[in-house]
Amino acid sequence: MFGTVRGPGREPLAECLHHLAIEGEQVAVNAYPVKGILAERFGLDVTEAFELLRRSARDNRLRLRDLSERVVASSETPAEILRARA
């Protein structure tokens, strides 16, 4: 009676959700060094550092992963994060 629910790429929805969960875990794992860097730069605890990163990415419509990579790649703090601190 009902067909398999399919996601955006036409794969079964369960498979889409599984991929999203894996991507979320990868972002969480990759965020550890970024949180430490931001915590050190701004005198924050790691929870506050992650919130700063998350808010900066969201406010600027950036992927968390992309902003994280920019933080790690440079000794300069990205402008999006500096604006969020203001």
Image (cartoon, helix red, strand yellow):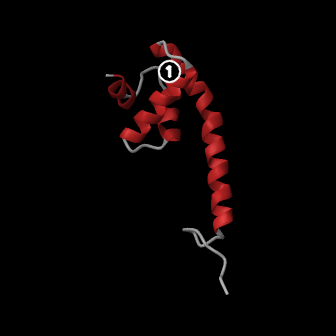
Side (left or right) of 79 relative to 73: left
Please state which of residues 48 and 20 is positioned toward the viewer in this rendering.
Answer: 48
Q: Position of residue 9 (x, y in %)?
A: 57, 69
Give the residue furthest to the bottom: 1
- Residue type at mark 1 is Leu
Side (left or right) of 53 relative to 83: right
Q: Position of residue 14 (x, y in %)?
A: 68, 64
Which residue corresponds to mark 1? 38
Give the residue furthest to the front: 1
Name the residue: 62% across, 53% down: 20
Name the residue: 61% across, 45% down: 24
Q: Can you tell which quarter of the image residue 18 is in? A: bottom right
Name the residue: 67% across, 87% down: 1
Q: Is residue 67 above or below residue 49?
A: below
Name the residue: 42% across, 43% down: 62
Q: Position of residue 33 (x, y in %)?
A: 60, 25
User: Would you call the spot at circle 1 few (<14 residues within 10 Å), some (14-19), or many (20 or more)?
Assistant: many
At numbered mark 1, what does the secondary structure look like: helix, strand or loop? helix
Q: Position of residue 57 (x, y in %)?
A: 43, 38
Q: Tell me the quadrant of the picture where the C terminus can be found.
A: top left
Q: Is residue 36 above or below residue 53?
A: above
Please state which of residues 51 and 56 is positioned toward the viewer in this rendering.
Answer: 51
